[in-house]
Image: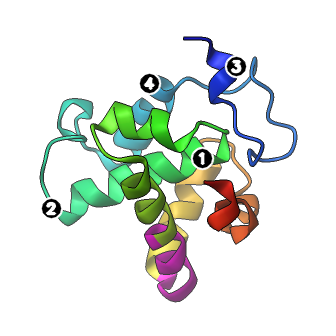
């Protein structure tokens, strides 16, 4: 399958197919930030520490233009579950200052502009 098929028109401005990190790199960076082993991130559990990591991976993956179905296949989830987790994290970032500070620190470590992610425009219903 061609990687060009997976670039989303809702990716952050300036993100090009050639200079975006792979999903493996995103997973590794997020897992190392939260100190969670990468082999347990996609296990079928509702533990909040793992859910938080999965949501961050999905949201950052969407920022880089990876499609919902591709992220879902990676996590063995439906694409709607990926969308739901991304929206849930966005809502938590709006109302929970501690979660927002933590996510902004992660974005700073990954050299991402957190303000672009916090703008919900790319994650509304039209991005499906």
The quarter of the picture where residue 99 lies is: bottom left
What residue is rendered at 47% in x and 33% in y? 70
- The image shows residue 79, relative to residue 122, as above or below, that is above
Label 3: which secondary element: helix
| Residue at mark 4 | 24
Label 3 crowd bin: few (<14), some (14–19), many (20+), radius 10 Å: few
User: From what the image shows, is residue 38 above or below residue 3?
Assistant: below
- Quadrant in the picture for residue 33: top left
> How does the figure colour the protein chain or chains?
rainbow
Judging by the rendered image, the residue that carries numbered circle 2 is 47
Residue ID for mark 1:
62
Of labels 1 and 2, earlier in sequence is: 2
Nearest to the eye among marks 1 and 4: give it. Answer: 1
Rendered location of residue 107, percent (x, y): 60, 52
Disc 4 element: helix
Residue at the location (54% across, 11% down)?
A: 1
The answer to whether marks 1 and 2 mark residues whose Cβ atoms lie closer than 8 Å is: no
Q: Reading the chain from its start, which is encountered first: label 3 or label 1? A: 3
Question: Is residue 34 toward the left or the right of residue 60 in the image?
Answer: left
Q: Is tag 1's residue or tag 4's residue first in the polypeptide sequence?
A: 4
Binning the other alpha carbons within 10 Å of mark 4 as few (below 14), some (14 to 19) or many (20 upward) gives few
Which residue position is annotated with label 3? 4
In the image, which residues are magenta? 88-97
């Amino acid at each position: 399958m061609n990687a060009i098929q997976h670039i989303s028109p809702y990716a952050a401005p300036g993100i090009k197919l050639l200079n975006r990190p792979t999903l493996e790199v995103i997973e590794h960076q997020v897992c190392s930030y939260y100190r969670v082993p990468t082999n347990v991130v996609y296990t079928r559990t509702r533990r909040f520490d793992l859910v938080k990591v999965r949501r961050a991976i999905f949201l950052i993956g969407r920022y880089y233009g990876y499609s919902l179905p591709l992220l879902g296949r990676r996590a063995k989830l439906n694409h709607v579950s990926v969308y739901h987790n991304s929206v849930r994290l966005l809502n938590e970032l709006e109302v929970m200052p501690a979660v927002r500070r933590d996510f902004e620190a992660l974005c700073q470590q990954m050299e991402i502009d957190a303000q672009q992610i916090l703008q919900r425009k790319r994650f509304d219903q039209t991005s499906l």
